Image: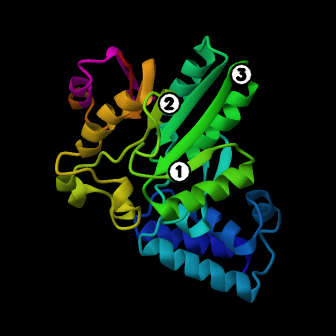
Amino acid sequence: MTVRTALLQGQQLLEDAHISEPRLTAEVLLMRATGHDRSWLYAHSTDELSELWWIHYGRYLHQRLQGKPSQYIVGHQEFYGRDFRVTPAVLIPRPETEGLVEAALAAANAATNTAIAILDIGAGSGAIAITLSLETKSLTTQARIAASDISLPALAIAKDNARALQAQVEFVACDLGSAFADGAFDLIVSNPPYVAERDRPTLQPEVRDHEPALALFAGDDGLALYRRLIPEAARLLRPGGWLMMELGDAAAVREMLHDWHDVEIQNDLAGIPRVVIARRP
């Protein structure tokens, strides 16, 4: 079995199972099995697979055909140009969430004070907090980054990612921001759970059956966390501080922010309302 034949057979199996991007998926799984990058696969396409490589590749293909996301099989996902470790304990970082990071960086860059404090509520893999920590290093304003999560397994992954990427983030285990004092932050960011329980059957099996329910579902209407997070942010923010959240139901969340100032909804590249920005009165 050569590298080329293994790729072709893997691609065919994935196509027959209607797995999206079958060629790319086969490449990613074979890269994981062999421990080599894509360029090596093509430079050694006529090489024979070792028995160990073939065993690993077959197992990874089987897992993917059973619905397990490729990111959990290979154990990592790229976000904002960096590699993050992921396991079923954390939500897989999505490219759309980079819009939330961009909004937060713009606010940090525009800050007039010499030091700002930022809190990421619901840290998950740590992708948002770690990215903010690394990207704000070049600013004249010094940023202190904290991140909270109620899940201890998720925090363990986030801490591993911070160590690997040499990011300075204070990780705290708590419900929302309950461990922090009133008025402690200038900016709060969050990608909260916002899938309605009633929509659970409509989700892709890869998401519904493998990603952590705690990070996905928020009550029957998907708004339960926003109802708690918005007043919690009002407590934690200094007057005039900013709250930025990824969105589910944009209209409903905007209505919850009726007492806040400068409320803005930003769309993602697909034109979907993705990020809400609001300033604490």
* Identity, as a three-letter code, of the amino acid under mark 2: Ala
Q: Nearer the viewer, residue 85 or 214?
A: 214
Q: Which of marks 2 and 1 is nearer the N terminus?
A: 1
Eye-nearest disc, 2 or 1: 2
Q: Which of 37 and 173 is in front in this view?
A: 173
Q: Is residue 162 left or right of residue 259?
A: right
Image quarter hosting the C terminus: top left
Q: Position of residue 246 (x, y in %)?
A: 39, 35
The numbered disc on residue 172 is 1
Which image quadrant is residue 163 in? Answer: bottom right
Q: What stretch is highlighted in magenta?
A: 253-271
Q: Residue at x 53, y 50 (%)?
A: 172
Q: Which of 265 and 29 is in front in this view?
A: 265
Which residue does the numbered mark 2 point to in the structure image?
184
Q: In this view, does 182 lie to the left or right of 12?
A: left
The numbered disc on residue 67 is none
Q: Position of residue 171 (x, y in %)?
A: 57, 49
Q: Residue at x 28, y 49 (%)?
A: 195
Q: Is residue 255 highlighted in magenta?
A: yes
Q: Residue at x 75, y 25 (%)?
A: 138
* Identity, as a three-letter code, of the amino acid under mark 1: Val
Is any atom of residue 236 visible in this view? Answer: yes
What colour scheme governs how the chains and residues are painted in the rendered image of this protein?
rainbow
Which residue does the numbered mark 3 point to in the structure image?
139
Image quarter hosting the N terminus: bottom right
Is any atom of residue 274 visible in this view? Answer: no
Distance from Cα at disc 2 to Cα at disc 1: 14 Å
Distance from Cα at disc 1 to Cα at disc 3: 25 Å
Q: Residue at x 54, y 57 (%)?
A: 155
Q: Which of marks 1 and 3 is nearer the N terminus?
A: 3
Q: Are marks 2 and 3 in contact (CB under 8 Å)?
A: no
Eye-nearest disc, 1 or 3: 1
